[in-house]
Amino acid sequence: MKTLKTLTIIFGIIILISCKQDQKDALINTAVVYGGGDIITMQGDLPEYAEAIVIKDGKIEFVGSSADAMEAAGKGHRMINLEGKTLLPGFIDAHGHVFNSGMMEIAAPLLPEPDGDCNSISKLIENMKVWKDNNSNVIEKYNVILGMGYDDSQLEEQRHPTADDLDKISTEIPVLAVHQSNHLASMNHKALEIAGYIKGVKDPKGGVIRRVLGTDEPNGVLEEMAFFLPLLKLMGQVDSTSNIALAKAGMNSYVKFGYTTAQEGRATRDACEVWKILGKSGELKIDVTAYPDLQVEMDYMLNEGTQKTYTNHYRTAGIKLSLDGSPQGKTAWLTEPYASGPEGNVGYPAISEDTEVQRLIDSAFVNNWQILAHCNGDAAGDQYLNALSKAAEKYGNEGRRDVMIHAQTARFDQLDRMKELGVIPSFFGMHTYYWGDIHVKNFGQERAYRISPAATAKKKGLIFTQHHDSPIVYPNSIMILHSVVNRTSRSGQIIGPDERISPYDALKSITSWAAYQCFEEDLKGDLSVGKLADFVILDKNPIKVDPASIKEIKILKTIKEGETVFELE
């Protein structure tokens, strides 16, 4: 077998010879040949490599040897030498919020290290003050000072900022600091007043308004629906021009990390329409699959339906349900109490009535809509699987490929049920790095070491995917790979060594298995003839490097249907 270095040299010589072809042929032939590097096809259960790949008119025409590629490409083709770099299928977003990812790009930066510098409440206040001074036009238009991404577990004070803290930014303008989980937030007193969260107000259904100790006065910290309701009002003020700017910012964030297919999870109708506008204008660089929130957008879905094929790179692919909260925020709904915090706390459901969950899931079955259900806690997982089982008995279950999003605390018996029902677990394995240490504290070591049990899922014969859930974290594909292969926390603790997976399976979870999850395995996900020329080029091969150094790999180029949509400068 030729070494990679030898192949690179040979491919370079072939390029020199090819350049002498008749120029007339070059004007006619649009074929492009890639070679001279590691081309991982992502076909099969073990890594398979090709010497060269030929693309034409946005699709793959040939995969195989360099010599056969030259013949398949014909005279006058263009050649690209990878120079020892690695080419893979473009990454596919198994779960994220590409529109909201744009908010991360324009709000005050509150992320902790390594993605930001917000490691104390004083730094949070400082960052939001700087943003306030530099964004007077946004504040004037929307009457809010917005920050995103703080993590109480990474703040020196080990607590959430309160209304008193945020009043130091402004007492006249509403201030909203969104937690990194996107399931909690903090408001200043002005924002609380506008939201109607005054002394004595009752908690909204599916949410909690935290109180000043020993009183019924809101302290500024909001959980779940208590946060979502005022956020929806804020987003309702955003005009079409600003929505388009947010969508573009989110899309640009995705392509930097090698994604050629993005997901609009828990979509609003406004977000769906923005993607359609961008597609129609030719500004949508990559494919977007949308999953509207069925609780909010039932009427929209009944009118819109789902589409199997893309129109201008957009399609509505199914629906989203959210059944609980976040484990780091202790709002994920568990069957056994959290190991820290108030005694007996098991979190809580987003939809407390099983009959309502059943109604929503039944409607998805009746209309043949694929379901993506947010279930961080195992109690939420039980609620989902029970409802799916009843719907399957009534309507049949063939070929549905419903998905359990996050499945962080999924029990092994639940994995068995998922296999029986054809459910795909989409794990948020990045939690092992970002919140692994916190999960050991919140769950105890035994449960924490089982979070996102991808290795066990594979042993049980399940196809699974991995995701980033941006804007919870950046849509960092390389950090997904690093996290699920190593499962090393911020402190260096290995969060469940038995649940680590191979670099190849990690790649499968964001390529071919992710394509299968969204019914696009005939279109993308591996490098085979007839599929889209959606590629990502990396500076190193994740399969060959030391696993501990995967996080250092760089995305060099993202290619959508043969066109470069991102290139590292």
Image (spheres, rainbow, N blue to C red):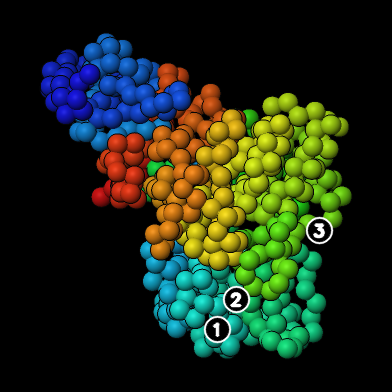
Asked if 150 appears above or below 275 in the picture, the reply is below
Q: Going by the picture, which residue comes out furthest to the front?
A: 446
The residue lying at 32 percent from left, 22 percent from top is 50
* Residue type, mark 3 in image: Ser
Q: Is mark 3 on a helix, strand or loop?
A: loop
* Residue type, mark 2 in image: Ser
Residue 86 point in image, percent of width and height: 29, 34
Q: Which one is nearer the viewer's eye here, 458 or 521?
A: 458
Number of labelled discs?
A: 3
Q: Which quadrant of the structure image shows residue 226?
A: bottom right
Residue 532 point in image, percent of width and height: 45, 27
Q: Nearer the viewer, mark 3 or mark 2?
A: 3
The residue lying at 38 percent from left, 18 percent from top is 61
* Residue type, mark 1 in image: Leu
Q: What element carries label 2?
A: strand
Q: Name the residue under label 2.
A: 186
The residue lying at 58 percent from left, 37 percent from top is 457
**Residue 166 badge:** 1
Real-space Cα distance between discs 3 and 1? 32 Å
Q: Which of marks 3 and 1 is in front?
A: 3
Residue 10 point in image, percent of width and height: 15, 21
Residue 490 visible in image: yes
> Dot 2 surroundings within 10 Å: few (below 14), some, or many (20 or more)?
many
Q: Name the residue under label 3.
A: 352
